[in-house]
Amino acid sequence: MKYLYYPGCSLEGTAREYDISTRAFMTAMGADLAEIEGWTCCGASAAEAVSELLTLVLPARNLALAEGMAPAGRDILVPCSACYLNLRRVEEKARVSHALKERINEALAVEDLVYHGRTRTRHLLDVVSRDLGAAGIARRVVRPLSGIRVAPYYGCQCLRPYTVFDDPEAPRSMEPLIAAAGADLHAWTMGGRCCGASHMNTKMEVGLKLVGAILEAARGADVVVTVCPMCQMNLDAYQRQVARQTGVDSTMTILYLPQLLGLAIGLSPEDLRLDLNLALTGAFLEKLERTATAA
Amino acid sequence: MALAEKTAIDLGTMPEEAAALAEIRAMVQPCIQCGTCTGSCPNEFAMDLTPRHMWRLVLLGLAEEVLASRTFSLCSACYMCTLRCPRGLPLTEAIGRLKQLAARRHLPHLRSGDLFYRNFIASVRRHGRVREMEFMGLYFAQMMNPWLPLRYAGMGGRLMRRGKVALQLPSRGSGRLVKLFEKVAEMENRS
Ligand code: SF4
Ligand code: SF4
């Protein structure tokens, strides 16, 4: 299992533990990740608010670099949902419009790059659930997370608008993975509900409402699991502000999916950098402790 | 005042704006005003126009009313309306176009989003990758809203203690994208 790897800017900064745990988990599962050399920002959610062409050219630059590294084609693994959508959008649009591809290539020519349209960008959740698979993970579990109740949070852009590996309205792809890890499922309907994305930076009152509703619905779970640095940051960094606004304690542990699965296959909290997560409750850590002694 | 005057510029008096608007209108032309988009939107509670109403105004050519609203700037690109629209319209993308149109005008009521995105993109242009601390600093400084950073102070401290923002130095492979940005600007001005 060989993949090209596009970490994206957040994974070098506020979401370092997502980068580290993705690499650690995937490598432990036998996958080989080659980081795209010289990658640059995909434009995040900002390019779309500024320029249509930039929204396509910034991701396309990275796709062209990826093609240069694997001319025969190799899947590009992307852990960030916003990066994933930006890269994928270029693939989808260039496939149906030759004129668009030409326009992109006209811009890329200033860097002597060409995008041919041979890449395939895949979200981490897609790769984990379909390439590794729940059965493949279950075979490697040495520390079943018994008694830990997990709320799977998918967010938006790994599900929509491109329907690739899951139901875009009622996603379930994480459920077999949670079961494989030996954990319990917190069944809820908020898994695909928007966290507000960058509203926390520009319209905080609105962002707090959306995040508050998600944390509220997560009550009863021990941990919420995410697959996107923006979702993670929104859910774990603003819990105090949410509590101040709603008057209800909304303390909740938020982990990235490879952190949770990594624990189950025996990686240590240090390997997975749980110390970098902003919200880890004592109750969660106690339960985790118990799974270690049981194993 | 200068900013207020700027917003009064009539749409359509600038040819590139008229063209952009015509494109947006064409994107939502088949709308049947069913309201599914409104019912699907997680941000609808904070909007002044409902999404359905906004599309109606776009179709009627009343773009000034649309741009004076907060509705499109409150879209968090969740793609739920795009997924569910019975006419299969690219609604989130059309909203992206409205955001671009607004960004070119620097509308004062959308100032925070406008500055946020412009600083973000400026950081990408300079470094190739985003240095979150740098662009957040610029953003706060330009908002000139002294209590604003305080709302983030607690979080900033926690991020810094974990070394999450201090490590944002240009890393291997991240180059400046100035040439590419200039080319894109040239192509956009040409069309
Ligand atoms: S869901 Fe589609 S057809 Fe219905 S009102 Fe919204 S844009 Fe129009
Ligand atoms: S994509 Fe935007 S407008 Fe559409 S439902 Fe989501 S937040 Fe609302």
Image (cartoon, rainbow, N blue to C red):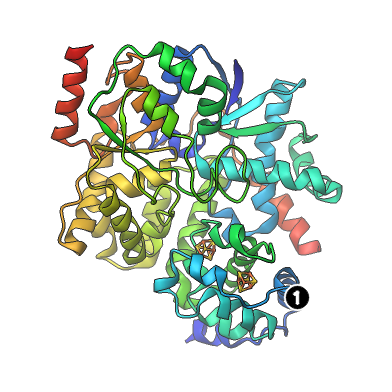
Residue in the picture at 17% in, 60% down: A244
Q: Is disc 1 placed on a helix, strand or loop?
A: helix
Q: Residue B102, relative to residue A273: is it above or below?
A: below
Q: Position of residue A155 (x, y in %)?
A: 45, 47
Residue in the picture at 82% in, 49% down: A97
Q: Which residue is mark 1?
A: B22
Specify whether A218 is left or right of A282: right
Instruction: State which chain disc 1 sits on.
Output: B
Q: Residue A269, relative to residue A169: is it above or below?
A: above
Picture quarter with ligand 1: bottom right
Could one spot residue B137 in this view of the protein? Answer: yes
Q: Position of residue A121 (x, y in %)?
A: 64, 34
Location of residue A285 by image quarter: top left
Quarter in which the C terminus of chain B is drawn: bottom right
Q: Position of residue B130 (x, y in %)?
A: 48, 43
Q: Residue B71, relative to residue A263: is it above or below?
A: below
